[in-house]
Amino acid sequence: MSAAGLAVALAVLLVLAGIVVLLSSVAGRLDRLHIRLATAQASLDRQLVDRAAATAAVGHAGVLDPAASVVLLAAAEHARSAPPVDRAAAESALSVDLRAVFRDAEAVEGWVAHPDAGPLLVELAASCDRVRLAHRFHDDLVVRTLAVRSRWLVRTAHLAGHAPRPALVELDDAAPEALTAATARGTAGLA
Amino acid sequence: MKVGLVCPYSLDVPGGVQNHVLELAEALIGLGLDVSVLAPADEQAALPPYVVPAGRAVPVPYNGSVARLSFGPASVARVRRWAAAGDFDVLHVHEPTAPSLSLLALASAQVPVVATFHSAMESGSRAMAVVRGVLRPALERISGQVAVSEHARATMRRHVGGTAVVIPNGLWVDRFAATAPDPRWRGPDGTLLFLGRTDEPRKGLSVLLAALPTLVAVRPGLRVLVAGAGDAADVWDGLPAGVARSVEVLGRVDDDDRRSLLASADVYVAPHTGGESFGIVLIEAMAAGTAVLASDLPAFAPVLDGALGVTFRTGDPERLAAGALGLLADRPGREATVARAAASVRRYDWSVVAPQVLRVYDAVTAGPRRPQVIA
């Protein structure tokens, strides 16, 4: 083989090696995104389950009036038992119910000051906040993963493989503000 | 006798329980009782003099739909003020398991309480199991339980326990019977009427709409009136092809128009698919002299009593069409059914129903109060 032929063969080999390295690095990145996404999904799920449990605990505490307690218990049960396709709607409904029950700042402060309900309400407010964070992180990862998946190279080389296409979670996660405020004051006082 | 009636649902929106409570109040006042009604309602709204508005209700998701309910410390305070000022001999709460004023009034009641259960739930029993612990202390204060139908009584037994007497929903039969048919509503090939929310699937409008191609093929001049709250555009979107000119979407109608529509239609169609407990609108149609064609729901069967109307298999548009065409074609048969029904609905007149309620009050307050004889 001539020297020129050898040089061409080497160059082709180098380009091929470069392509392999590029593909495997993008594939690795995508794989890590999908793994983190699975973790984020599990985390959001757990935070929502915790929030429903914290809501039910407040409903059973016997400190709120029975009508408000029934609203909370029914909403928590509805969220807990919703089939996957209705889950986001049921969790959003729970957020609406929480804001409705904890809409009156003066009443909320009275409940937070109650020894039987105070710790449960602090926990509920914290879990509402954790839901909001977990939802935000989850959706952020979805956006980043979709951005990588939409690249020409990824689509052409099928680098996403059979990983399901991730989707944003349509969730109303706005916190009951009066509860957030009252419990923040309460814990500041304890510290 | 001083009676305090509590309605859990907002008077700012129409509804079966709200109507029942207001008409019962009127009927009891007619019997000489001193009646006050507490209900969620806008303080600025025009209300009958016997209603004490408890302020606007809060729309919240509850049991899978949005309900306007009153709860929280402000509502508790209002209920207590009303009960203290009213100095009632008996408190009559409606739908006490709904998270609203009735439950709050029950929880703080100081006098004998009568509770009326209106709803028949096919689902939601798991939610009831979850809230049972919260409801129990309140429900234990009930002295007399009333259900509006056998169906409602069965639901109550399952979720609350205990036994109830059945006293049906009432209506003023003569207000319907005296309404004259309005030629404006008549169609050359007959008139069908649907009443109820157009956007609530269990009211069954989609079943009626699916029957229209068959109906219009046989009776091209048929008129189908659709009256009830909901977005008209959604109704038009749901129409099968070629039937649009037979349909009129009227939107929400007031009580006068409602009676006029019922008196003018040939057939009132009740294609409900579930969730009904009593079917007061069937009785209204019967009182107005209109033939009733209804789903064969368990709640409707006792009202129609076999010969007072025609039923079809729930959710089946072809059976609906066959039933409607049968009624429209057989005028003498239809008129005979209507005459039987008009006589039968007298048992739901408030002049019959209100005294039954009064006897329950007597039973829980240890007997009727007779004028004291002064020696």
Image (cartoon, coloured by chain):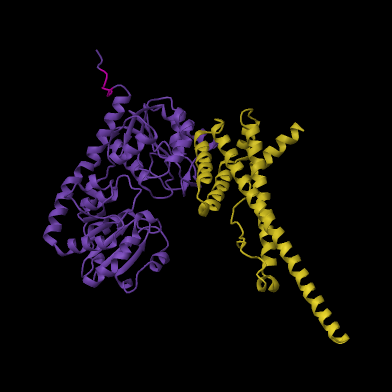
Figure quadrant of the N terminus of chain B: top left
When the figure is inspected, residue B151 is found, relative to residue B259, above or below; the finding is above
Q: What stretch is highlighted in magenta?
A: B367-372
> Viewed as shown, does residue B311 lie left or right of A67?
left
Can you see residue B348? Answer: yes
Tell me if residue B9 is in the magenta stretch. Answer: no
Can you see residue B219? Answer: no
Q: Please tell me in which quadrant of the rendered image residue B210 appears.
A: bottom left
> Viewed as shown, does residue B303 lie left or right of B69?
left
Give x and y (percent) for residue B255. Answer: 32, 53
Q: Which residue is drawn at 35% across and 38% down?
A: B155
Q: Main secondary structure of the magenta part?
A: loop
Give x and y (percent) for residue B114. Answer: 35, 31
Colour representing chain B: purple
Figure quadrant of the C terminus of chain B: top left
When the figure is inspected, residue A72 is found, relative to residue B163, above or below; the finding is below
